[in-house]
Image (cartoon, grey):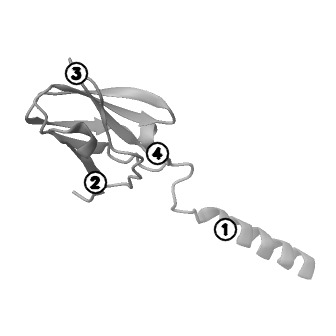
Amino acid sequence: MRHTLRRAAVIALVAIAACFRNNAPENEPDPRPDPIPVHVRNENFLDMNVYVVTSGVSRRLGTVSGNSAGDFKINWSVAYGQPVTITATPIGGRGSATTGALNVGIGQMIDFKIASILRQSVASVHDP
């Protein structure tokens, strides 16, 4: 009788435990972060081709006309977990402006000011 009672209790506990579920989703990937916004202000009179460089690989973002501004986006798959460098090369000119290595966190953006003298260009990473 005791043996049967114990067996029934164990079966009841297993049945009750099976009814409870973990409400946490299984194997749900982390949501993808938004792309990194890049604002480029070109104070040079030449048009500039703008590139992002990660791990030695250069990807063109676009062109910013002389004395104007442009906005671009960098996918996190390009920059996730590694520093990025923004480079601008003049169309029809020589030299380049570069930011140096930038570490960008989720939710941050890059401002890059291309100066009239390219080596005086500056960049900053900040929250929008």
- Under circle 4, the secondary element is loop
The residue wearing badge 4 is 80
Residue 15 appearing in the image: yes
Q: Is residue 26 left or right of residue 17?
A: left
Whether tag 3 and tag 4 are in contact, CB under 8 A, the answer is no
Whether tag 2 and tag 4 are in contact, CB under 8 A, the answer is no
Q: Residue at x 56, y 49 (%)?
A: 27
Indicate the amino acid at tag 2: Ser
Disc 3 versus disc 1: nearer the observer:
3
Q: Is residue 15 above or below residue 37?
A: below
Q: Residue at x 37, y 48 (%)?
A: 33
Q: Is residue 86 left or right of residue 66?
A: right
- Under circle 1, the secondary element is helix
Indicate the amino acid at tag 3: Gly
Counting residues from the N terminus, which is met first, the one under dot 1 or under dot 2?
1
Cα–Cα span, label 1 and label 2: 54 Å
Whether tag 2 and tag 3 are in contact, CB under 8 A, the answer is no
- Within 10 Å of disc 2 (Cα), the crowding (few <14, some 14-19, many 20+) is few
Disc 2 versus disc 3: nearer the observer:
3
Q: Residue at x 39, y 55 (%)?
A: 105
The residue wearing badge 2 is 124
- Within 10 Å of disc 4 (Cα), the crowding (few <14, some 14-19, many 20+) is some
Please state which of residues 32 and 4 is positioned toward the viewer in this rendering.
Answer: 32
Q: Is residue 122 left or right of residue 45?
A: right
